[in-house]
Amino acid sequence: MYKLILIILSCLWGNAQGVEKDLGTGLIIAPGWELVRMHCGACHSYKLVTAQRADKEGWRSMIQWMQETQNLWEFDEVTENGILNYLSNSYPPQANRRRAPIAKNLMPTM
Ligand code: HEC
């Protein structure tokens, strides 16, 4: 029950921030999201995708790694660009995921 409330709250929170998510996959709805729904859910949960953050090059190298070692199929250039643009726009690196460094005056004295 609590879980359900949390899920509903997090959906509302997401909407409050202007981010619309697909209920089935959890993917942020933005140009190209259907490509990712089509190509990125066959082998693992979409959660693995939505939990990851990277710039375009980072996403490219993850996809290449899956293509080289995990039997992920090849994409034509248009499809690959659509996927990479979507991923790097919707799941970009987040500088603020790390806390700010501790201020000097709050550090233990040596
Ligand atoms: C053919 C199967 C397959 C498909 C399709 C696939 N993946 Fe993967 N992917 C894998 C495997 C296998 C792993 C490793 C899973 C694990 O570690 O449990 C993985 C891992 C990942 C990870 C975690 C990488 C890390 O370093 O933590 C991400 C992110 C990811 N995939 C994104 C995608 C995206 C985006 C797509 C669509 C372009 C996609 N996957 C499509 C097989 C696939």
Image (cartoon, rainbow, N blue to C red):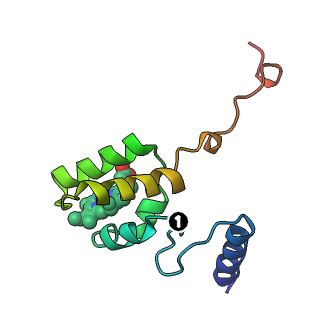
Q: Which residue is mark 1?
A: 30
Query: Quarter of the image containing the N terminus?
Result: bottom right
Query: Quarter of the image containing the C terminus?
Result: top right
Question: In the displayed structure, would residue 13 be above or below residue 106?
Answer: below
Task: List the single residue furthest toward the right.
Answer: 105
| Image coords of residue 17 (percent x, y) | 72, 64
Q: Is residue 32 left or right of residue 89?
A: left
Q: What residue is shown at x 36% (from left), y 68% (from top)?
A: 35
| Image coords of residue 96 (percent x, y) | 65, 42
Mark 1 residue crowding within 10 angstroms, few (<14) / some (14–19) / many (20+)? some
Q: What residue is shown at x 42% (from left), y 68% (from top)?
A: 46
Query: Can residue 99 be seen by looking at this rendering?
Result: yes
Q: Which quarter of the picture shows residue 36?
A: bottom left
Q: Which quarter of the picture shows residue 39?
A: bottom left
> Which image quadrant shows ligand 1?
bottom left
Question: In the displayed structure, would residue 73 be above or below residue 3?
Answer: above
- The amino acid sitting under disc 1 is Ala
Q: Nearer the viewer, residue 54 or 48?
A: 54
